[in-house]
Amino acid sequence: MKTLFTHYLNNFRGLSKEIWLLSLVTFVNRAGAMVIPFLSLYLENDKCFSLPQIGWIMSSFGLGSFFGTLVGGKLTDKIGFYKVIILSLFLGGLGFIGLQYMDTLAELCIGVFILIFVADAYRPAVFVACDAYSKPENITRSIALIRLAINLGFSIGPMIGGLIIARINYSSLFWIDGISCIVAAAMLFMLLKPKTAKEKLAEGNDKQGISPYKNGVYMLLIAIMIFSGIMFVQYFSVVPLYYKNIHFLSEDIIGLILFLNGAIIVFLEMPLVGWLEKIKISKTMAIFWSMIFLALSFVVLNMSSWVGVLVIGMILMTIGEMIGSPFANSLALEMSPKGRKGTYMALFSMSFSLSHIFGHNGGMNLANEFGYDMTWYIMFVALLMVGGMSLWLHKLVRNRYI
């Protein structure tokens, strides 16, 4: 047991203190982010919206994320990641507190758009921060550590959030979300140095390299991220409704299943990433295998009415996420030229935003029109096709790009 624990800790060695500080701040922020996993349930139960209406609100979520990451990337290249992260956390905290006071469909669409616009400016900035504070050989593990902090927070958040909803109300979650964001901004301001020599280089005005929109291989990576993300986001909107409406699970049990995702990532992602790097798996093949596991996570839901398949599906999805996400992020950073990293990583983050725009709405309407079973089959087939795109990316990167 001691040897196993030592091997686990070895995966964290060599990372800079700035990455650890950034991870701590990220954990505090994400631990309070209890509203997001329960947003679709909140809109259905407390606000009594229909599935198509919830789909439009979640599309507003995606639009806010899209434009927020676009502006966040440009601001990161212009004023630096440090200022962008602090402003995003602080203003996002105020936004979470205010969202609970909105009631109509129009108000919630606008409110969710503004909130996520501000909150997701954080995403390209934190990727550039990872690059600025990491040695080249540590970037994938640095990203994995940031993801560990995110998922540790998300694993604790939904579990506590489900208990709070079951025993108090939804309103408490908005206050906790908002206050935690403001606390995270204060921690970052006090603990993280705003400038390093590497950061100044990254913030320079010299636009080296071509635009990401003219980089065909990078745009293929973005397309893969968009299409796979459309399926992945179902776990944050349609799947929780499936748990409740088909398997009749309560919010606290749903929170525990969501907790499983974060808990697995916390304990296994860093060792898994370390092992995959040791066997020298390419970043593109890691993306391919992530698509396969994500596809299996959907089709398994149709194999039995036994509630245990929900846990199996969550485990398969989590394996796919652990394999794909750190390596996809690392590949995007690797393909990003100096002086354009904010723009490149903004586009990478925007791919997930586009997934929110089309994924939630599309998933809600598919489930509403054809039922959950057919929706999961569609997701399965679509992800197999994305897996084929990943193999094409692997060939292009191997032969032409790097």
Image (cartoon, rainbow, N blue to C red):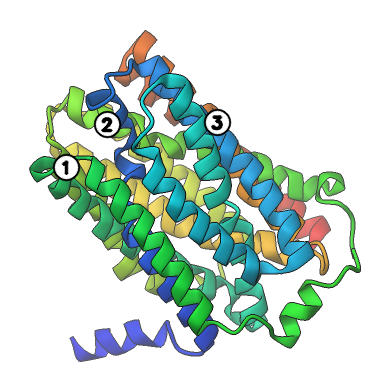
Residue designated by label 3: 357
In the picture, measured across the screen, residue 28 lies left or right of residue 344, that is left
Task: Name the residue: 52% across, 77% down.
Answer: 189
Task: Name the residue: 30% across, 20% down.
Answer: 373
Observer-nearest of 262 and 106: 106
Q: Which residue is most to the top?
A: 369
Position of 74 relative to 246 (above/below): below
Disc number lying in front (2 or 1)? 1
N-terminal of the two: label 2 or label 1?
2
Residue designated by label 1: 165
Q: The disc labelled 1 sits on which kind of residue? A: Ile
Secondary element under disc 1, as helix, strand or loop, is helix
Judge whether residue 48 can be spotted in this image. yes
Q: What distance separates the C-alpha of mark 1 from that of mark 3? A: 27 Å
Task: Name the residue: 18% across, 86% down.
Answer: 1
Q: The disc labelled 3 sits on which kind of residue? A: Ile
Q: Position of residue 49 (x, y in %)?
A: 32, 18
Q: Position of residue 184 (x, y in %)?
A: 43, 68
Secondary element under disc 2, as helix, strand or loop, is helix
To which quarter of the image does residue 35 belong? top left
Judge whether residue 382 can be spotted in this image. no
Q: What distance separates the C-alpha of mark 3 from that of mark 2? A: 18 Å
Residue designated by label 2: 41
Secondary element under disc 3, as helix, strand or loop, is helix
Position of 13 relative to 186 (above/below): below
Observer-nearest of 99 and 122: 99
In the picture, measured across the screen, residue 321 lies left or right of residue 42, that is right
Q: Are marks 2 and 1 in contact (CB under 8 Å)?
A: yes
